[in-house]
Image (cartoon, grey):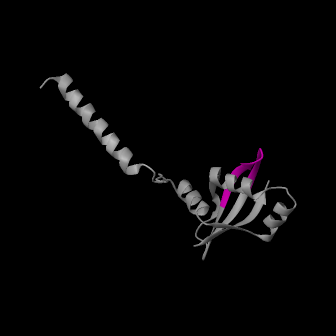
């Protein structure tokens, strides 16, 4: 068998496999969160977010809004050196992010069914 024919069969099978994968995964919300930071952020963002009294005060004084907090949690970086992940019953995570071009440190208490925003530090 000639080399050109082998390459043609290979590319034909590869294209057919891509088409089959496109039909299988079409419309499904699949993601690849393999790193520890990505898993923590995905876990926190999948839960109901509750605000502590200090953060409710900041929101009511219009220093920050809940939409920008949600965006900060989506794009933030988990700082494991400032976090207490093994605390029982809920781990504490420190997340660095930006809100309106200001660096902030969000402290999240991550429980089984809810995540509580404890503090926001500029």
Q: Is residue 22 left or right of residue 106?
A: left
Decide: is 67 above or below 102: below
**Position in image of residue 21 (x %, y %):** 35, 46
Span highlighted in magenta in the image: 94-105
- The residue at 49%/54% (across/down) is 33
Predominant SS of the magenta segment? strand
Q: Position of residue 50 (x, y in %)?
A: 70, 68
Instruction: Please tell me which residue is depicted at 26% across the width and 33% down the height of the picture.
Output: 12
Quadrant placement of the N terminus? top left
Give coordinates of residue 112: x percent, y percent.
Answer: 57, 73
- Is residue 122 a member of the stretch shown in magenta? no
| Residue depicted at x 25% and y 37% | 13
Q: Nearer the viewer, residue 55 or 67?
A: 67
Quarter of the image for residue 65 reads: bottom right
Write down the quadrant of residue 121 in the picture. bottom right
Left-right relation of 61 to 32: right
Which residue reaches farthest left? 1
Residue at 18%, 25% (x, y): give it: 5
């Amino acid at each position: 068998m000639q080399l050109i024919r082998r390459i043609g069969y290979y590319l034909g099978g590869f294209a057919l496999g891509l088409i089959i994968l496109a039909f299988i995964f079409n419309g499904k919300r699949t993601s690849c969160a393999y790193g520890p930071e990505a898993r923590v952020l995905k876990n926190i963002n999948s839960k109901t977010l509750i605000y502590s009294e200090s953060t409710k005060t900041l929101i009511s004084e219009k220093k920050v809004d809940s939409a920008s907090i949600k965006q900060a949690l989506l794009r933030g970086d988990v700082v494991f050196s400032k976090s207490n992940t093994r605390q029982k019953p809920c781990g504490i995570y420190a997340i660095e992010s930006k809100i309106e071009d200001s660096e902030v440190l969000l402290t999240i208490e991550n429980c089984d069914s809810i995540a509580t925003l404890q503090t926001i530090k500029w």
